[in-house]
Amino acid sequence: MAAERILGAVLAGGRSSRFGSDKAMAQMPDGRTLIDHAMAGLAPHVAQVVICGRAGGLPDRPAPDMGPLGGLSAALHHALVQGFDGVLTTGCDMPLYPAELPAALIGEGAAILKGQQLLGWWPATLAPDLDAHLAADNNRSIHGWLDRIGARVVDMPWLALPNINRPEDLTHWAEDD
């Protein structure tokens, strides 16, 4: 599938409770923010990158503070309206996006990277299904959504991807870099 038919979405609507401040704006050792790294990682694989769930980006659907699924819903609806086939996602706390990941994820139906459910591929046609899921009586966990749609889980055990959840994770990532 050509990159011109793929939307990239950085899911950035979390509360950063474990981090203690706005995690998306945390500075990496190179001086760029976590969200800048996430956007730059997606950009080579997609036609457009959007930020979901924070000021200046696509607002969560159907309401604010919906967590990752609210951001994903916003991205899927944007993709449908704009004529994209689907959405590649990453979290704002994922500073790396491996070049081989899109080819592993994009395929029939939704897919996530094992252990990193925000690194995913979501066909745009899932927008109404996600609306129904968010309207249902459930806890809105991403795991429940994955079960509902039967998402594929892609295992790439050789990938050791940092996930920045606490300030000290920035320090460890800098040491490993």
Image (spheres, rainbow, N blue to C red):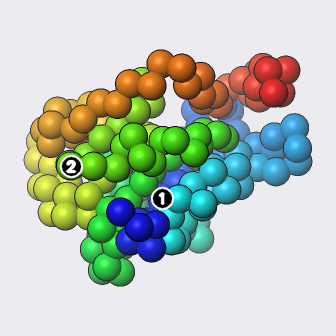
Which of the two residues, 20 or 165, is positioned nearer the viewer here? 165
C-alpha span from label 1 to label 2? 19 Å
- Residue in view at x 31 percent, y 79 percent: 83
Residue type, mark 2 in image:
Glu
Q: What amino acid is at disc 1?
A: Ala
Q: Which residue extends farthest bottom?
A: 82
| Foreground residue among 42 and 74 | 42
Q: Could you say whether the residue bearing mark 1 is in a helix, strand or loop?
A: strand
Q: Nearer the viewer, mark 1 or mark 2?
A: 2
Q: Position of residue 137 (x, y in %)?
A: 12, 42
Label 2 sits on residue? 108
What residue is shown with label 1? 9
Question: Where in the figure is residue 108, as x and y percent of width and height?
Answer: 21, 49
Q: Which mark is residue 141?
A: none
Q: Quadrant of the N terminus?
A: bottom left
**Looking at the image, which is closer to me, 81 or 110?**
110
Q: Residue at x 57, y 55 (%)?
A: 42
